[in-house]
Image (cartoon, rainbow, N blue to C red):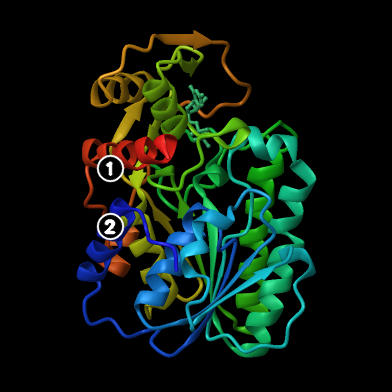
Amino acid sequence: MKRLDPVLEEDTKRMLVDLEGDSAVEGRSVLVTGGAGFLGSWLCDLLLKLGAQVTCLDNFSSGRLDNVSHLLGHERFRLVKQDVTRFERNDKYDFIVHAASRASPEDYQIHPIETMLANSLGSLKVLEVARRCDSKILYTSTSEVYGDAKVIPTPEDYWGNVNPIGPRSCYDEAKRFGEALFMSYYRKYGVDVRIARIFNTYGPRLREDSAYGRAVSRFISQALRGDDITVYGDGEQTRSFCYVTDMTVGLYLMLTREGVKGQVVNLGNPRETTINELAELIKRITNSRSRIVHLPPVPDDPRRRCPDISRATELLGWRPRVSLEDGLRRTVEWLKRKIES
Ligand code: UDP
């Protein structure tokens, strides 16, 4: 079996300390769609450490074999290469996480129909499995359902401000449809659905290459290589960045805890940061001589994004613990090793 990067090894251990004694998934069968993606692969790692039997379903459109190759050969891990929209199996699952979808704005705009189908037809497929197996099923939704939010920090009862035909609508509206379908299965059939609205998350395994690159991973890669750091627009737009271990623990709690059936919960770090601040911070942490340059703004780019996480704290006792500085340092360490290898 391949060895895990030391940052990933240490981070996984830290999550286990947070969840010490938790036996909710021990000996249970879990399906993770998008299990070779950024968040999916962190979940597979955590679930296996907690004693679950894990089936990872991925079509490798944006997920990478490299994210799960260290798990091949693990006796409780099974990898299925298949598109979730074609998923047909008669296996029994106690828990399901539906995380299969492209998530990077540049990438999903190149593949808009595939993105819409993963969250509509893909959601239908997994909901039918959950209905048949009586599983708990978690949908990884997004802060993008709020669009260009006018209420900041944004609580779950805000209905959103989304352009239904704009360039981001293939993702935003697909996730909104996905949420509505999950709630319909809950109301009509009593399926134990849970919906997490995930705000910007970063950390090891977040892709930095081509259209997959997100602000954090792309800026770190640019800073390490001495390339220009490319800020879109005036850089005064904001995001709130959550480190991946905090998010993974949050998702795990959403999947397994009582009292969240039929609930939608924001998961994210409430520290709001401008993209200019992010670029400066990354430049400082990497000790880089890169220039920060401004490129034209991208259409429909939400101006501010910050979660109200009171519901997550109340229902799950969850809040992020890793500071942006610490999380960025860990991500830099990981990416540096990856670039050098
Ligand atoms: N961004 C940027 N330069 C890049 C990539 C992203 O300035 O090379 C900006 C983007 O316009 C947005 C923010 O950073 O305002 C976060 O973008 P990301 O792609 O990480 O995710 P989003 O939050 O838009 O889904």
Q: Considering the numbered disc 2 on the image, is that residue within a helix, a strand or a loop? A: helix
From the top left corner, tell me how far across and down residue 322 is, in percent.
Answer: 23, 48
From the top left corner, tell me how far across and down residue 72 is, in percent.
Answer: 53, 71
Residue that badge 2 annotates: 11
**Is the residue indicated by label 1 positioned so its CB lies within 8 Å of ligand 1?**
no
Query: Splitting the image into 4 quarters, where does residue 152 fall?
Result: top left
Name the amino acid, label 2.
Asp
From the top left corner, tell me how far across and down residue 315 is, in percent.
Answer: 32, 68
Closest to the observer: 43 or 233? Answer: 43
Quarter of the image where the N terminus is located: bottom left
From the top left corner, tell me how far across and down residue 26 is, in percent.
Answer: 38, 87
Name the amino acid, label 1.
Arg
Residue that badge 1 annotates: 330
Q: Is residue 251 left or right of residue 100?
A: left
Query: Splitting the image into 4 quarters, where does residue 88 fall?
Result: bottom right
User: Does residue 196 show up?
Assistant: no
Q: Is residue 219 above or below residue 165?
A: above
Disc on res. 112: none
Q: Is residue 197 above or below residue 170?
A: below
Contact, mark 1 vs mark 2 (Cβ under 8 Å): yes
Residue at (71, 65) in percent of width and height: 84
Q: Considering the numbered disc 1 on the image, is that residue within a helix, a strand or a loop? A: helix
User: Does residue 253 show up?
Assistant: yes
The Cα atoms of the two marked residues, 1 and 2, are separated by: 9 Å
Residue at (38, 83) in percent of width and height: 51
Query: Splitting the image into 4 quarters, where does residue 144 fall?
Result: top right
Q: Residues within 10 Å of mark 2 (few under 14, many from 20)?
A: some
Q: Is residue 78 above or below residue 293?
A: below
Mark closest to the chain's N terminus, 1 or 2: 2
